[in-house]
């Protein structure tokens, strides 16, 4: 049940089937010279939409902005503050709660540590605010890396590398502009730097040259299946 595609009566009928909603959260940030700025958002949204084909679940409209600290100096990245992300997610969950939803899955396609910490903080505060809800925070990329570990050839592959390029070749090939050189960032341990592009010029973390559409299809299938299993566990969770 894709919320932005539903009518009001369809939403009401959906509440008779489930009180679970998944909120895809992405980012608008550089993904090397070959992938679109909306890669993280597209990946989270696409697996969520596929999940809705397997089971009754509400899929909220995707949030296309996130906290992008390491890529903030790269052209095209639009980053927001952690306080903004927390407030936005909290407001959306508050509104969905008011509409009758009770189980909330925050699925982020952006794997930044600061971004994810803000989502966990928002979730913890929501648990304190409502005593009749469940909240989960999942990093979609970690699901892809974990479920697809037998398919991935690049050790330490991450941002705009083998995994993400494969997935975009599968789901949105029209938006992939070739490939990019293998690269890993070289940020100094523990030191915060102003000019982040100096230590990560190409914006790739991994090896896009190892990507393929077939590999992307298999990884995405594994992610959707893992999400399906997770929702079953989540909906039956008892403290």
Image: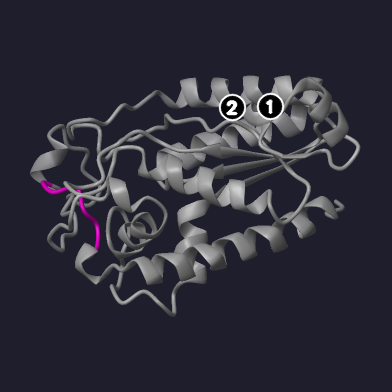
User: What percent of the width, then of the height, locates residue 212?
Assistant: 31, 68
- Color scheme of the displayed model: one colour
Is 212 left, or right, of 233 in this rendering?
left
How far is disc 2 from disc 1 in space, using C-alphas?
6 Å
Mark 1 Cα-neighbour bin, 10 Å: few <14, some 14–19, many ≥20: many
Out of 200 and 161, give the one closest to the viewer: 161
Residue 120: quarter of image:
top right
Residue furthest toward the right?
A: 16
Most frequent secondary structure within the magenta stretch:
loop
- Number of labels in the image equals 2
Query: Which residue in the protein does label 1 denote?
Result: 93
Residue shown at 48% from the left, 59% from the top: 142
Query: What residue is rendered at 22% in x and 52% in y?
Result: 189
Is 213 placed above or below 172 here?
below
- The disc at residue 199 is none
Whole-percent x, y for residue 141 in the image? 45, 55
Q: Which image quarter is the N terminus in?
A: top right
Span shown in magenta:
201-206
Residue 122 visible here: yes
Classify 79 as above or below 233.
Answer: above
Q: In the figure, residue 226 lies in which quadrant?
A: bottom right
Say which mark, if any, is on residue 89: 2
Q: Residue furthest bottom?
A: 150
* Front residue of 195 and 8: 8
Is 161 positioned to the left or the right of 104 in the image?
left
Q: Secondary structure at mark 1?
A: helix
Q: Secondary structure at mark 2?
A: helix
Viewer-closest of 21 and 11: 11
Residue 29, magenta (yes or no): no
Query: How far from the left and from the top, in percent, is residue 169?
Result: 33, 58
Check if mark 2's residue and mark 1's residue have beta carbons within 8 Å. Answer: yes
């Amino acid at each position: 049940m894709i919320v932005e595609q539903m009518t009001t009566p369809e939403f009401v009928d959906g509440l008779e089937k489930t009180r679970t909603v998944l909120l895809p959260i992405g980012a608008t940030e550089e993904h090397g010279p070959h992938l679109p700025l909306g890669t993280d958002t597209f990946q989270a949204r696409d697996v969520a939409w596929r999940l809705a084909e397997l089971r009754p679940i509400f899929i909220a409209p995707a949030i296309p902005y996130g906290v992008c600290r390491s890529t903030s100096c790269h052209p095209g990245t639009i980053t927001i503050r952690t306080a903004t992300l927390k407030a936005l997610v909290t407001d959306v969950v508050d509104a969905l709660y008011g509409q009758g939803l009770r189980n909330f899955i925050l699925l982020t396609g952006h794997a930044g540590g600061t971004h994810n910490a803000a989502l966990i903080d928002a979730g913890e505060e929501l648990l304190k605010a409502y005593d009749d809800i469940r909240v989960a925070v999942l990093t979609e990329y970690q699901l892809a890396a974990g479920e697809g570990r037998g398919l991935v050839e690049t050790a330490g592959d991450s941002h705009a590398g083998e995994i993400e390029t494969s997935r975009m070749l599968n789901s949105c090939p029209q938006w992939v502009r070739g490939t990019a050189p293998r690269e890993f960032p070289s940020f100094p341990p523990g030191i915060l730097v102003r000019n982040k592009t100096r230590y990560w010029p190409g914006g790739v973390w991994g090896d896009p040259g190892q990507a393929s559409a077939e590999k992307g299809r298999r990884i995405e299938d594994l992610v959707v299946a893992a999400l399906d299993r997770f929702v079953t566990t989540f909906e039956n969770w008892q403290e």
